[in-house]
Image (tube, rainbow, N blue to C red):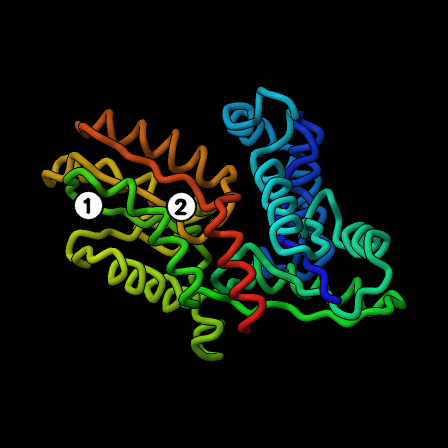
């Protein structure tokens, strides 16, 4: 019998300054995130960058944090719902794990084994359709480290990036179609930006590591499925930490669109199957405000796939056909 662990990057444990600071410190002290291996870099991440950045990040999290019960981060809330639906509809044990924060990878292994001691294999399904050193690689490396350091009685299989898998594209198309019933000027794709030097290093290894290729392939396949002309689409990158990151920047260039006559846009972030800070704040709050203040007339935000039934079915198809 197989089990499934849904894997994501992570979230602060709570909406508080210490929790946000801990989360930022954990993430930025990872050498695969900032490409820094010296102990001084970890010191800077935890003792300087995280404390300085936590207040600004806390303000963002406070705007998107769930006010209803349970009062948890949106990414954890939707992942819990996705876990429950996948488990109930496909009759397999499912747990969730975060690269940084809770629930940890080790706790996910322990929980799923306790739930079903006769497991022969666990499939790790990263909620990360595209390869990136700072998300996919560090998450799967940590999975392997935890697995190899423990004597688990089951095998593991890590799902490869599924940016072009027909089931993923079909789920996205099903999800997006209801938002395209009215006329619009541009369909805007937003993806997390990456340091250009990381992108180039990965690109040299082939398409299975080429983030920009994979992003554009997803866009091409999806627009074909939706029968939307590529000429009516735009690509932006968000959440950059410096100028040497992939452009154009969502928070810098979205305000230019009304000046070009594109005042009615529909926007989505296909790189995030579950809503989080990057979708709910960077896109739906910050980009919306910048666009509307610049003269935009209609800003239609498409939520992530989250726990929709067609996404549950797509995950199962990806797992069983990969």
Q: Residue at x 24, y 27 (%)?
A: 292
Mark 2 / mark 1, whichever is N-terminal: 1
Foreground of the two, 283 or 89: 89
Residue 98 seen by the camera: yes
The location of residue 217, given as percent across then percent down, is: 34, 66
Outermost residue, left side: 261
Q: Where does the N terminus fall, quadrant-wise?
A: bottom right
Judge whether 30 appears above or below 299 on screen.
Answer: below
Secondary structure under the numbered disc 2 in the rendered image: strand
Please give left or right for residue 193 compared with residue 217 in the image.
right
Front position among marks 2 and 1: 1
Q: Residue at x 66, y 51 (%)?
A: 87
Outermost residue, right side: 151
Distance in Å between CA atoms under marks 2 and 1:
18 Å
The location of residue 115, given as percent across then percent down, is: 82, 52
The location of residue 240, given as percent across then percent down, is: 44, 47
Q: Residue at x 38, y 59 (%)?
A: 170
Please give left or right for residue 167 compared with residue 220 in the image.
right
Outermost residue, top side: 67
Task: Quickly name the residue at label 1.
Answer: 186
Task: Quickly name the residue at label 2.
Answer: 238
Foreground of the two, 94 or 77: 94
């Amino acid at each position: 019998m197989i089990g499934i662990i849904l894997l994501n990057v992570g979230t602060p444990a709570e909406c508080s300054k210490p929790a946000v600071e801990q989360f930022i410190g954990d993430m930025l002290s990872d050498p695969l995130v900032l490409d820094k291996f010296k102990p001084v870099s970890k010191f800077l991440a935890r003792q300087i960058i995280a404390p300085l950045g936590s207040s600004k990040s806390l303000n963002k999290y406070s705007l998107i944090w769930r006010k209803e019960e349970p009062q948890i981060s949106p990414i954890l809330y939707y992942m819990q719902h996705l876990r429950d639906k996948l488990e109930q509809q496909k009759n397999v044990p499912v747990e969730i794990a975060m690269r940084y924060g809770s629930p940890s990878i080790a706790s996910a292994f322990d929980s799923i084994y306790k739930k079903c001691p006769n497991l022969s294999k666990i499939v790790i399904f990263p909620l990360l359709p595209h390869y990136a050193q700072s998300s996919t690689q560090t998450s799967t490396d940590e999975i392997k480290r935890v697995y190899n350091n423990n004597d688990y009685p089951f095998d593991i299989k890590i799902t490869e990036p599924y940016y072009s898998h027909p089931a993923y594209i079909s789920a996205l198309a099903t999800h997006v179609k209801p938002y395209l019933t009215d006329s619009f000027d541009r369909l805007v794709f937003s993806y997390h930006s990456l340091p250009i030097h990381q992108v180039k290093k990965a690109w040299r290894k082939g398409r299975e590591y080429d983030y920009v290729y994979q992003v554009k392939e997803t866009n091409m396949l999806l627009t074909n499925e939706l029968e939307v002309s590529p000429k009516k689409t735009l690509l932006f990158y968000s959440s950059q930490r410096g100028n040497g990151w992939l452009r154009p920047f969502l928070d810098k260039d979205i305000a230019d669109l009304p000046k070009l006559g594109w005042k009615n846009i529909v926007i989505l972030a296909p790189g995030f199957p579950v809503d989080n800070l990057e979708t709910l704040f960077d896109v739906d709050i910050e980009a919306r405000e910048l666009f509307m203040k610049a003269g935009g007339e209609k800003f239609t935000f498409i939520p992530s796939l989250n726990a929709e039934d067609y996404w549950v079915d797509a995950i199962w198809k990806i797992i069983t056909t990969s």
